[in-house]
Image (spheres, grey):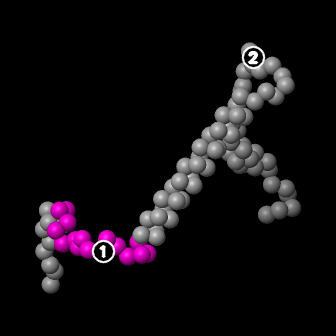
Amino acid sequence: MTSQVDPAEALRGSNRSIRGGGSIAQKSLVIAQAAMSLVLLSAAALLGQSLRNLEHQNFGFETDARYLERRHFELRAARSQDRKKIPEPAGRA
C-alpha cells in the first residue's frame, strides 16, 4: 500500500519540524563545509595572484615584438600509424 503525498504540501514544508534546528553532526558538517569553501577560495586567489606575478615578471630579455607559437601533436595517433607502416620481421608469426 502506497501513501499519497501532495506535492504542494511537500514544497511548503508543512510537515517539517521547527524545534531544535538540527543535530550536532549536521551543524558541524555545515561548519566544515563553510571552512573548506573558504580554504578553497583563498587557495584559488593565491594561485591567481601567482600566475599574474609570473605573467608580469622580468626574465631579463626583451619580449616586445615576439610571437608565441604553440603546437599540439597527437603522439598516439602518429605512433599507431607508424606501427601500421612497419612490416613484421620474417621470424615472427
Quadrant housing residue 69: top right
Q: Residue furthest right?
A: 91
Q: Is residue 81 visible?
A: no
Q: Main secondary structure of the magenta part?
A: loop
In this rendering, which labeled residue sits more in front, label 1 or label 2? 1
Instruction: Identify residue for label 2.
Output: 64
Instruction: Identify residue for label 1.
Output: 20
The stretch drawn in magenta includes residue 19: yes
Q: Secondary structure at mark 1?
A: loop
Which residues make up the magenta segment?
11-26
User: Mark 1 is on which residue type?
Assistant: Gly
Q: Is residue 27 above or below residue 53?
A: below
Q: Residue 26 placed where, x, y %?
A: 41, 72
Q: Residue 85 placed where, x, y %?
A: 75, 45
The residues tagged by marks 1 and 2 sit, at their Cα atoms, a distance apart of 65 Å
User: Mark 2 is on which residue type?
Assistant: Asp
Q: Secondary structure at mark 2?
A: loop
Q: Is residue 23 left or right of residue 41?
A: left
Which residue is at a point 43% across and 75% down the rendered structure image? 25
Q: Is residue 92 above or below residue 71?
A: below
Circle 1 packing at 10 Å, graded few (<14), some (14-19), many (20+), is few
Give the number of callouts.
2
Query: Which part of the image, by quadrant, shows the N terminus?
Result: bottom left
Query: Which part of the image, by quadrant, shows the C terminus?
Result: bottom right
CB atoms of marks 1 and 2 within 8 Å: no
